[in-house]
Image (spheres, rainbow, N blue to C red):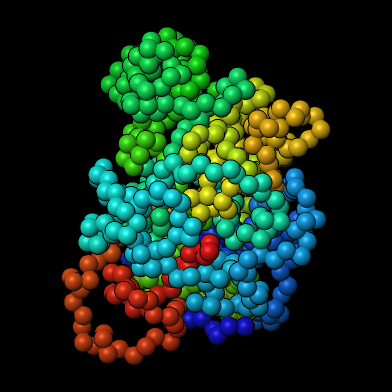
């Protein structure tokens, strides 16, 4: 057991998913004492990213569903007569129907070890710096305090660093140059912009190579992109958390129509340079997109169709079938049968408003995976004094019978910790509280393939594709394909994520789409089909609980000072998580600013008494960092979230 933690905090956060991490960062930034714990040995919960071996361990863990053994039996003596307990769940019941498949010679990987892997760390309930590790078998280097100094393994030929400031100006610098604005400490988003790589004959990738190069993979449990003018990007810039991450443009929007994958023209230049559209279609498309940007000013053009679906509204706009398909599935990306006209117009306007801020598409993707984003906010929290404990389960919430408020938690080691507010991720709540909650499910699939779904001169493409439902009435499937320059897969492979709201098991929902786009080396496929389609080397299917959008009143017997954060939703963006975090924070601290920018170190006036104050009893990082950032200079000890080493 680790040394005991302090017994009093202002806020205790249980779970390290994105909403919890943002809320914890906001609380620490406003001066609250924050304890952030997670029963898992990695950050992010269902928002996490794994290496290939880490994902295999995660698959095995969720297929076996092992119980957490009790370490302390005499914890009930900590509960007073006027108190009662709410026991928290020991099992993670958010993942179901996990099925993984290898379409290569799996026996060839026997005895193959992951390159650079370390011996597994002992399972200790460590706190602070000891508790911070993305995965126990990974060697994780420390993130530098500025984005410009962070190093990328295997930088692709032609890669340039693109520094995007708060406005729309883009500065491109070579690999050996640093951006002047970055040197000045301005909020920036780093984009890896890759040009056409020299053509070479691709080598056949085997399963044993995937195992050996497993640390090159950063595989997300949840697949999302960041809208360039979305709430998360705005928050990253406002709070200056953007310095802890790097981003790459989604380079193309694709459409699947009549059995073929096509690139969708998005920007004005793309539309007029497109060879897919006739001159008449180009004028039709530009006229409609211009209307969507200003649709609120012309209510007479859509108010008669407010009760109709967006698909029905498009048919009234004198658009060709191909344009209707592009707008519905690739631009608005809404349901053909369920989305109203207003929802479709709003989605189209959002898409168009995000174009051009950081590139020709509205989307950004974080290098090393979506799991980096929760870690960035955890780092901000730690910089401002938050204490982190992974592998640290919480046994129960302690509730005062008279007031009905939660007073404390009792952890797995039998320590009682008091706080004013408690934030709990939904999966930790017991069934007794969630009796009236109706959860939805998300169907997920992750594929490792040997080619892109649409080959071009450039191999380094980040693509998004919406595949219409095979069966009418079912949801469309969102496909995100990532190349090796996103630092999520090894060279000569692609990482493909498929997501949709569940109607059956993930495999039943998504395998028909996989069979349309990829070759599974099945006997039914002809040799020509196998050569034409990308080959799937490995795949996993699973269902994930969607706990978003649940009203607080649905939870039975929830104390007034306990707030629930949801897991990932099925939407493409992250707006739901950001709104939820801000709502919870403002409810707890209505007079405080939500995640303001850190102070300039030159503006800080240090008091001599503060400088000579003795060291605190608990430090959340014994390590010293080179070139401390503004937050580190003003907060003293800190724990840095560590970026996965892909080398």
Quarter of the image for the N terminus: give it: bottom right
Q: Position of residue 591 (x, y in %)?
A: 29, 59
| Relative depth, front residue between 287 and 254 | 254
Residue plotted at (66% across, 49% down): 205
Picture coordinates of residue 485, whole percent (x, y): 48, 50
Question: Would you say 151 lies left or right of 93 here?
Answer: left
Q: Position of residue 378 (x, y in %)?
A: 45, 64
Q: Is residue 68 above or below residue 508?
A: below
Residue 474 at x, y percent in the picture: 64, 28
Please indicate whether residue 338 sits to the left or right of residue 639 in the image. right
Residue 481, compared with residue 388, is above or below; it is: above
Write the residue at 66% across / 75% down: 119
In depth, the one of 107 and 351 nearer the eye is 107
- Asked which quadrant contains residue 303, the reply is top left
- Quadrant assignment, res 150: bottom left
Measuring 29% from the left and 49% from the top, which residue is drawn there?
172
Identify the residue shown where x is 68% and y is 41%: 536
**Which corner quadrant of the image does residue 383 belong to?**
bottom left
Q: Is residue 278 visible?
A: yes
- Relative to 19, 303 lies left or right: left
Reply above or below: 350 against 43.
above
């Amino acid at each position: 057991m680790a040394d005991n933690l302090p017994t009093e905090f202002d806020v205790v956060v249980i779970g390290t998913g994105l909403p919890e991490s943002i809320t914890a960062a906001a609380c620490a930034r406003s001066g609250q004492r924050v304890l952030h714990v997670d029963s898992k040995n990695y950050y992010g919960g269902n928002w996490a990213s794994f290496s290939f071996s880490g994902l295999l361990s995660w698959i095995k863990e969720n297929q076996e569903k092992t119980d957490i053994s009790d370490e302390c039996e005499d914890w009930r003596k900590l509960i007073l007569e006027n108190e009662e307990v709410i026991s928290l769940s020991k099992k993670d019941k958010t993942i179901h129907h996990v099925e993984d498949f290898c379409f290569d010679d799996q026996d060839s990987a026997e005895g193959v070890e992951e390159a650079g892997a370390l011996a597994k760390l002992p399972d200790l309930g460590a706190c602070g710096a000891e508790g911070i590790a993305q995965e126990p078998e990974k060697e994780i280097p420390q993130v530098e305090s500025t984005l410009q100094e962070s190093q990328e393994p295997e930088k692709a030929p032609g890669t340039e660093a693109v520094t995007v400031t708060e406005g729309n100006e883009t500065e491109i610098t070579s690999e050996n140059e640093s951006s002047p604005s970055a040197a000045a400490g301005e909020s920036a988003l780093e984009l890896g912009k890759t040009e056409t790589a020299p053509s070479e004959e691709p080598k056949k990738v085997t399963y044993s190579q995937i195992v050996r190069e497993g640390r090159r993979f950063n595989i997300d449990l949840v697949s999302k992109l960041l809208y360039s003018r979305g709430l998360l990007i705005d928050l990253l810039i406002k709070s200056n958390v953007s310095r802890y991450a790097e981003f790459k443009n989604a380079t193309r929007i694709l459409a699947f129509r009549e059995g073929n994958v096509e690139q969708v023209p998005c920007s004005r230049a793309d539309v007029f340079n497109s060879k897919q559209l006739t001159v008449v279609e180009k004028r039709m498309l530009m006229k409609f997109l211009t209307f969507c940007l200003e649709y609120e000013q012309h209510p007479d053009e859509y108010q008669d169709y407010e009760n109709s679906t967006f698909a029905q509204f498009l048919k009234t706009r004198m658009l060709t079938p191909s344009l209707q398909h592009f707008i519905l599935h690739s631009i608005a990306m809404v349901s053909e049968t369920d989305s109203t006209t207003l929802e479709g117009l709003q989605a189209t306007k959002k898409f168009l408003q995000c174009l051009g801020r950081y590139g020709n598409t509205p989307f950004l993707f974080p290098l090393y995976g979506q799991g980096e984003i929760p870690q960035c906010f955890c780092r901000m929290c730690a910089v401002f004094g938050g204490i982190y404990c992974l592998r640290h389960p919480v046994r129960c919430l302690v509730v005062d019978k008279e007031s009905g408020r939660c007073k404390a938690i009792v952890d797995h080691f039998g320590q009682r910790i008091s706080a004013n507010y408690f934030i709990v991720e939904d999966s930790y709540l017991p069934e007794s509280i969630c009796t009236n909650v109706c959860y939805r499910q998300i169907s997920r699939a992750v594929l490792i393939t040997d080619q892109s779904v649409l080959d071009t001169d450039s191999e380094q493409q980040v693509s998004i594709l919406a595949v219409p439902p095979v069966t009418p009435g079912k949801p469309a499937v969102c496909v995100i394909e990532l190349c090796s320059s996103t630092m999520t897969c090894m060279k000569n492979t692609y990482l493909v994520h498929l997501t949709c709201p569940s109607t059956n098991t993930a495999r039943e929902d998504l395998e028909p789409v996989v069979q349309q786009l990829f070759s599974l080396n099945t006997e039914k496929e002809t040799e020509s089909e196998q050569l034409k389609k990308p080959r799937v080397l490995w795949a996993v299917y699973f269902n994930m609980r969607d706990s978003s959008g649940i009203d607080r009143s649905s939870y039975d017997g929830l104390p007034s000072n306990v707030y629930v954060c949801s897991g990932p939703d099925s939407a493409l963006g992250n707006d739901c998580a950001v709104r939820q975090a801000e709502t919870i924070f403002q409810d707890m601290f209505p007079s405080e600013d939500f995640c303001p920018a850190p102070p300039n170190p030159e503006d800080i006036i240090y008091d001599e008494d503060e400088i000579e104050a003795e060291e605190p009893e608990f430090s959340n990082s014994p390590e010293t960092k080179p070139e401390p950032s503004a937050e580190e200079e003003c907060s003293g000890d800190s724990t840095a979230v560590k970026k996965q080493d892909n080398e």
